Amino acid sequence: MKHALVTGASGFIGHHLVEHLLQQGLDVRCLVRPSSDTSHLAPQAENVFGCLDDPASLKEAMRDIDVVFHLAGRTKAFHSDELFKVNETGSANLARVCADQSSPPIMVTVSSLAAAGPNVPCDSGANACMRPRRESDPVAPVSDYGRSKLAGERAIRNFADQMPVSIVRPPIVLGPLDKDGLELFKTMRLLRIHVMPGSGDHLFSAIAAPDLADALIAVARSGRRCRDGDDTTGCYFAADPDPFTYRELGRMVGRTIARPRAWPINVPMPLVHGMAFLNEGLGRLRGHPHILNLDKIREARAGGWACDSQKISQECGFHVAEPLQQRIHETAQWYRDAGWL
């Protein structure tokens, strides 16, 4: 594994992956759109322009590549077909170009816990008992985003008999350069409140972007590969091993930004739904979908989103380098240094 192609390299996860690949001595090529902000990308990486709906640009980017990290995707849109166009059709285009190479590269694609679904009932069957999701659980996405990511997984898995493919499904991802997560830090620092949709007591998982970068590289080097028609083999959850409640997340962030007593506010789901409805309208006026939209409310209503990360540890030897509290501290410090917080 010497020459890597990273799609979605200009995103905040892509930035961390490119840095880690370069640190490990790989030659890195970044597939970026002409409109992408590449200011945070390492100068040692090679940038090539292209996009998932342009097979010719993908063929050019694939030259001499032996591993592809597919991070490009869409997380929010006004219409579901926009999600499927990128997350399913675009992924299929990339996989087809990979498979057509005389020596097909390893392909590691970044999906999402949303493609698998929320927490599942405990094996004991106890009332109201929910446990983190495992890779062996039947998939049950609840949002258009989750369904589009699952469709993308399956589109890529169709080529599993022609090239080595693995899939990584991260939960919440945080870290330096994360603009979505910044809102939580800013709200707690400026308003001294921690806004929690619903009860705030459902279990969630998260992973820091630097740890996710290590997980992707570990899967590329030693992960098992997918089989067509099998949603389990070669598929991994990558997360900090300790789930938390949204209430506990607020405490962790509060300790980091000197707001340990931020006032927790439980927002009833009907009110959250109303806020998302308003955001949909505002987003359409501005031409940019809001992160808190009606599709995300479908995920919020489903309860907790935690996953069991034992499989990636056992099969790939991956373990997070730092506990989540330390990663939150590092993220807050980066926000301060960058003038974001």
Image (cartoon, rainbow, N blue to C red):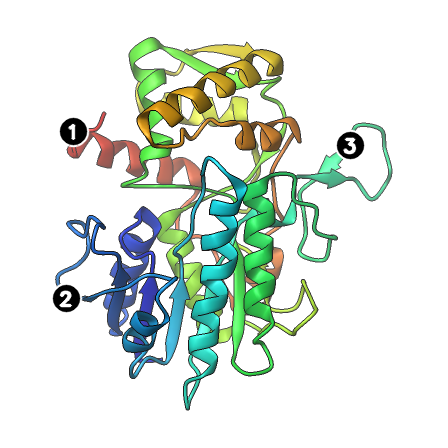
Q: Residues within 10 Å of mark 2 (few under 14, many from 20)?
A: few
Is residue 174 visible in the rendered image? The answer is: yes
**Alpha carbon distance from label 3 to label 2:** 49 Å
* Relative height, residue 71 to residue 116 (above, below): below
Q: Quadrant of residue 336?
A: top left
Q: Is residue 161 left or right of residue 253?
A: right
Query: Is residue 98 or residue 264 the one in the foreground?
Result: 98
Query: Is residue 16 or residue 59 the one in the foreground?
Result: 59
Is residue 239 visible in the rendered image? The answer is: no
Q: Is residue 123 left or right of residue 82?
A: right
Badge 1 vs badge 3, beta-carbon distance below 8 Å: no
**Alpha carbon distance from label 1 to label 2:** 26 Å
Please tell me which residue is depicted at 35% across the width and 50% down the height of the picture. 13
Q: Residues within 10 Å of mark 1 (few under 14, many from 20)?
A: few
* Relative height, residue 133 to residue 260 (above, below): below
Please tell me which residue is depicted at 37% across the width and 48% down the height of the picture. 209
Secondary structure at numbered mark 2? loop
Residue 267, image x, y percentages? 55, 12
Ranked by sequence position, the earlier of labels 1 and 3 is: 3
Badge 3 vs badge 2, beta-carbon distance below 8 Å: no
Q: Quadrant of residue 300?
A: top right
* Relative height, residue 109 to residue 133 (above, below): below
The residue tagged 3 is: 129
Please tell me which residue is depicted at 50% across the width and 38% down the height of the picture. 79
Query: Comparing marks 3 and 2, which lies closer to the viewer?
Result: 2
The residue tagged 2 is: 44
Query: Comparing marks 1 and 3, which lies closer to the viewer?
Result: 1
The amino acid at mark 2 is Gln
